[in-house]
Amino acid sequence: MKREAIENKMKNHKPSIIGQKQITNYSILLPLMEKEGELHLVFEVRSLQMRRQPGEICFPGGKVDLQDRQVLDAAVREAKEELGITGHDIEKVYPFDYMVFPFGMIVHTYVGFLNCPEDRISPNPAEVEEVFTVPLSFFQENEPDIHYVNFDVIPDEGFPFELIANGRDYEWQTRKMEEFFYQYEDKVIWGLTARVLHAFIESLD
């Protein structure tokens, strides 16, 4: 290939994530609602019948499907399905940050406001065990507990050590990841939900 051909390709290239075809996009909504004179965040407890992470606390959200015209649509669609509300009950949805995971997953987050009373929320029992709210001020006034998870590298059997420098003595880089824990009454919020929540609260300072 000649230089000119490469230059033309690079001039018209739009940067994207390497390996993007293998990436799954998810979209979640951080719902806020007025309650008892202040703003509350709305959380779900995942149904105990769910195959993945039953009983854990999360925000409404899920996988971005082909039917979703844009990533935002997935967050709103999932919130309507899981909370049993309509599109008219969600207003002023704003994009927040997104998280890129090394295991082929991007999580896009949005902040939106529910304009319906709490008793209009009717959780879908197939996905949601219960819904509860926490005053936003609680998270602003209480730092999460932080614990750590270590990730070790364990090559598969048959890994070609003979092809890399230092062979079996190669020094793999291990990773330490923070895990945030918020405890509110009898509820424990941790994992991805707590990570997104912590970032959102920090952005309000």
Image (spheres, rainbow, N blue to C red):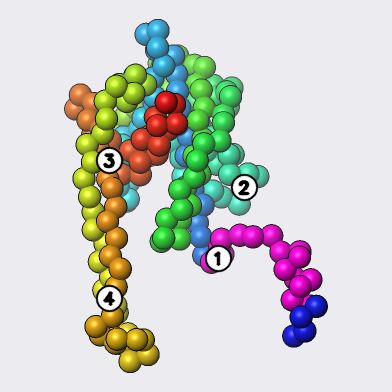
Q: Is residue 35 above or below residue 61?
A: above
Nearer the observer, disc 4 or disc 3? 4
Q: Residue at left 56%, top 31%?
A: 94
Task: Tell me the SS state at disc 4.
Answer: loop
Give the residue type at disc 3. Answer: Phe
Dot 4 or dot 3, earlier in sequence: 4
Q: Quick one: 26 or 68, which is closer to the camera? A: 26
The region drawn magenta spans 5-21
Dot 1 or dot 3, earlier in sequence: 1
Residues marked 4 and 3 touching at CB (< 8 Å): no
Q: Which residue is mark 3?
A: 180
Q: Quick one: 101 or 146, which is closer to the camera? A: 146
Q: Is residue 64 above or below residue 3?
A: above
Nearer the observer, disc 4 or disc 1? 4
Q: Which residue is mark 4?
A: 171
Q: Residue at left 41%, top 16%?
A: 39
Q: Is residue 129 above or below residue 158?
A: above
